[in-house]
Image (spheres, rainbow, N blue to C red):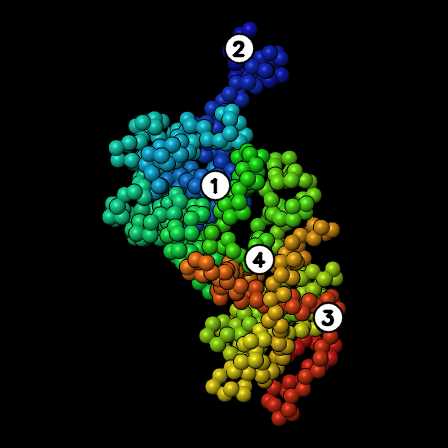
């Protein structure tokens, strides 16, 4: 059969054999295009890691499990900036201010031989398949650098193996005209920090945690690159507690999460291995089932070992799977069954979801006052099912009057008829200033806010843990937070038990670390009270008529002012 195709022939005039041959030729051309221009077909593995393409900040941390795609997506972001080629899936949303013309990019990895040659470069070479076999299948991709962005379409002419320097063509994203050459320099952590102290860098990627000295040198290079330059680390947290990564917590992780240390120029992304559709998730599930919880948290969920002793370990702000037969968080096989028990009584859950305040629900305002840092406030409603939903949080600088004003500002937007107030019993009963007779509770009384003293029993923590587990009937947790309460969510993920500096033969400590404890402790006070749906009747509090605030709480009516 003559398979030569005359493109001018109309489809209607083609025979069945000719039409089949034409279709096969089109498929062949498309597969060839997917190989030579894989970047055009790129789609982020999930919305979470896809955020990297929306961010315009100066520092980014991507923390994830092994094989979660953290380095893959960080490389793609750099290639977009180096070549000016925006994938079709991102054209409508990609911030054009990040496309600056030819740039200098630096990639730093653990080893030039075992990591660069075997892992990093194949992710870039258009002729190298990355993923599950067979080649060209649905679980993987060809190298990200387009063939037409190489010098004469030749990898060997573009890559200088001696200098570890890759030159790529930058094309205008609108006209596709060549405007110059971008350079990608490859270095490793076994080099001296002084080797990094030269040149300007516009995009610097660290694959796995770098030594602090190298990070600081690269930070200086990126600073020289000017506004719009980015320094980034993509890593899995080490399981060895002696690993020197505390500086990453201080300079990236803490600054990229909501709270007092938040830096708007720093962003972090947390991703799981289970989120990567290009992996064989059944194999991932089998391997995860054989891991210890500590190893699974680090290698699958990308959690730092520092948080391995979390007080509320089941809390999550990203969807996870819960097996009711195992009674814990599990990894699923591709057919949706549990890798540990092969059970099917499973639900996907998350503690962060939109919460709608309802006027007929009981509402509790919780307060943790502080003399030297902001006062922490949270509003929690009790649903008709007696679930607990955090509808708002706020941190307020200043004194009692400032707290009163902030409370009134928030509660004007909430529909509740009554609000019951509870405060930290330790701070509430302690002196608020030089006069020992005047307590924090009295300070707030004097401005028209009466707070009951909560109970400091440890029972509330275990009750909260029970409410964090998905309910077997409703298939969802009984304690939830609105996405707007990001500061409370961040503390719940970082609230840990204190540890002995030198363990030896000492028993483990039974007290929490006094850090990231404000909101979790407020929720403990509420759990100690265990209010029901109708537990919102108000007591009457009256002050001396000589008071300038005219404080009076009316029973059953109105907000507490």
Task: Quickly name the residue at label 2.
Answer: 3
Marks 4/3: CA distance?
A: 26 Å
Nearest to the eye among marks 2 and 4: give it. 4
Say whether marks 1 and 4 touch (CB < 8 Å): no
Q: Quadrant of the C terminus?
A: bottom right
N-term-proximal mark, 1 vs 4: 1
For discs 1 and 4, the disc positioned in front in the rendered view: 4
In the displayed structure image, the side of residue 492 where residue 178 appears, left or right: left
Q: Residue 66 carries which label?
A: 1
Q: Which residue is drawn at 70% across and 43% down?
A: 345
Circle 3 is placed at which residue position? 535
Rounded to the nearest angstrom, the CA distance separating label 1 from label 3 is 47 Å
Tell me the element at label 3.
loop
Q: What element carries label 1?
A: loop
Nearer to us in this view, 60 or 235:
235
Q: Which residue does the numbered mark 4 point to in the structure image?
A: 312
Q: Quadrant of residue 467?
A: bottom right
Q: Which of marks 4 and 3 is in front?
A: 4
Establish if 125 lies above or below 476: above
Query: Sequence order check: which comes first, mark 2 or mark 4?
Result: 2
């Amino acid at each position: 059969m003559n398979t030569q195709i005359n493109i001018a022939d109309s489809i209607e005039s083609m025979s069945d054999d000719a039409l089949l041959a034409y279709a096969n030729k089109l498929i062949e051309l498309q597969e060839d295009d997917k190989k030579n221009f894989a970047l055009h077909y790129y789609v982020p593995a999930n919305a979470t890691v896809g955020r990297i393409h929306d961010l315009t900040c100066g520092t980014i941390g991507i923390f994830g499990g092994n094989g979660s795609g953290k380095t893959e997506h960080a490389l793609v972001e750099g290639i977009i900036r180096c070549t000016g080629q925006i994938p079709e899936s991102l054209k409508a949303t990609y911030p054009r201010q990040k496309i600056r013309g030819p740039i200098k990019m630096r990639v730093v990895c653990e080893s030039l031989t075992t990591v660069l040659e075997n892992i990093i470069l194949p992710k870039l070479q258009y002729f190298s398949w990355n993923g599950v076999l067979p080649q060209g299948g649905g679980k993987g991709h060809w190298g990200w650098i387009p063939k037409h962005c190489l010098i004469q379409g030749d990898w060997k002419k573009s890559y200088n193996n001696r200098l570890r320097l890759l030159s790529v063509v930058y094309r205008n994203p609108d006209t596709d005209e060549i405007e110059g050459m971008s350079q990608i320099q490859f270095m490793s952590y076994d080099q001296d920090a002084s080797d990094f102290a030269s040149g300007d860098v516009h995009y610097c990627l660290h694959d796995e945690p770098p030594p602090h000295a190298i990070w600081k040198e690269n930070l200086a290079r990126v600073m020289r690159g000017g506004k719009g330059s980015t320094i980034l680390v993509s890593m899995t947290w080490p399981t060895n507690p002696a690993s020197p990564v505390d500086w990453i917590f201080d300079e990236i992780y803490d600054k990229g999460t909501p709270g007092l240390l938040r830096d708007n120029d720093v962003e972090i992304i947390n991703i799981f291995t289970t989120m990567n559709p290009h992996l064989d998730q059944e194999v991932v599930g089998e391997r995860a089932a054989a891991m210890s919880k500590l190893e699974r948290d680090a290698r699958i969920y990308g959690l730092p070992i520092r948080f391995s002793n979390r007080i509320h370990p089941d809390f999550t702000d990203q969807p996870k799977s819960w097996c009711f037969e195992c009674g814990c968080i599990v990894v699923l096989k591709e057919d949706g069954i549990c890798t540990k028990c092969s059970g099917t009584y499973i639900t996907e859950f998350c503690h962060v979801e939109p919460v709608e305040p309802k006027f007929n629900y009981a509402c509790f305002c919780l307060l943790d006052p502080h003399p030297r840092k902001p006062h922490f406030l949270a509003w929690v409603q009790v649903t008709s099912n007696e679930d607990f939903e955090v509808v708002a949080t706020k941190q307020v600088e200043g004194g009692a009057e400032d707290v009163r004003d902030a409370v009134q500002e928030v509660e004007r937007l909430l529909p509740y008829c009554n609000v019951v107030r509870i405060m930290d019993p330790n701070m509430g009963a302690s002196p608020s200033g030089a006069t020992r007779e005047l307590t924090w509770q009295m300070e707030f009384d004097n401005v028209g806010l009466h707070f009951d003293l909560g109970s400091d029993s440890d029972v509330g923590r275990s009750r909260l843990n029970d409410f964090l587990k998905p309910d077997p009937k409703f298939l969802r947790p009984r304690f939830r937070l609105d996405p707007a309460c990001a500061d409370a969510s961040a503390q719940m993920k970082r609230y840990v038990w204190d540890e002995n500096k030198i363990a030896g033969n000492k028993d483990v400590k039974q007290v929490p670390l006094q850090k990231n404890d404000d909101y979790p402790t407020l929720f403990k006070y509420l759990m100690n009270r265990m209010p029901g749906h109708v537990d919102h009747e108000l007591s009457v509090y009256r002050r001396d008529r000589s008071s300038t605030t005219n404080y009076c709480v009316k029973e059953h009516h109105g907000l507490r002012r």
